[in-house]
Image (cartoon, grey):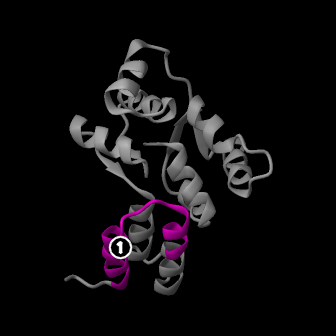
Amino acid sequence: MIVFDASTLILLAKIELLTPLSKDIDIIITEIVEKEAAGKINSLDAKIIRSLIKKGAIVVKPVKETPIVEELMNDFNMDKGESSVVVLYKEINADLVATDDGQLIKAAKLMEIPFVSSITFLIRGKQKGLIDEDIALEKLRKLEDFGWYKTRVVEDAEKRIRGDKR
């Protein structure tokens, strides 16, 4: 069970990886993340996310409005969506958090919450033989265009997709 934030849902939808991924893992989101990720009426990625929610491939769970949500927002300079991800992760005792948000990544590290990013899903898909190398590299380029990744992160991902162990 993995709790996703909006940025990761959107990025995976944009590179056409969210739908196949939703068949293999349990994707859980908060109501706040649903609004952030699926709220754009004419956006293709929002349409994909809404479709997966409707099919039950993405499960939406409420998060109790507690002072913890506000505390996390203040302590880690996070938006409400990212803060709700941490709260839901703890409430349901999830396995991981999926995020590409810098502030949530910092919070996860400090709070010892295991996390993965869109790039992680792409690399694992290639390593498991679910994605051809050329397609994985093409999707990595799209992630580079859509996301806010540091150059070294993209370079490392490219090496791992190519199977370079150096």
Return the residue found at the far left. 166
Q: Is residue 111 above or below residue 11?
A: above
At 37% from the left edge and 18% from the top edge, which residue is drawn?
68
Left or right: residue 36 compared with residue 134: right
Q: Secondary structure at mark 1?
A: helix
Front-most of 100 and 128? 100
Quarter holding the C terminus?
A: bottom left
Residue 19 at x, y = what percent?
Answer: 62, 59
Left or right: residue 16 compared with residue 28: right
Asked if the magenta segment contains residue 83, the reply would be no
Front-most of 126 and 42? 42
Main secondary-structure element of the magenta-colored stretch: helix
Return the residue found at the far right. 42
Q: Is residue 163 above or below residue 40?
A: below
Front-most of 61 and 106? 106
Residue denoted by label 1:
157
At 46% from the left edge and 84% from the top edge, which residue is drawn?
133
Residue 143 at x, y = what percent?
Answer: 51, 67
Q: Is residue 121 above or below residue 46?
A: below
Q: Amino acid at mark 1?
A: Ala
Residue 9 at x, y = what percent?
Answer: 55, 51
Instruction: Residue 146: name its quadrant.
Output: bottom right
- Residues packed near mark 1 inside 10 Å, few (<14), some (14 to 19) or many (20 plus): many
Q: Which residues are magenta?
A: 141-162
Left or right: residue 101 compared with residue 61: left
Residue 23 seen: no
Residue 150 seen: yes
Quarter holding the N terminus?
A: top left
Residue 47 at x, y = what percent?
Answer: 74, 51
At 50% from the left edge and 61% from the top edge, which residue is drawn?
147
At 30% from the left edge and 38% from the top edge, which residue is drawn?
107
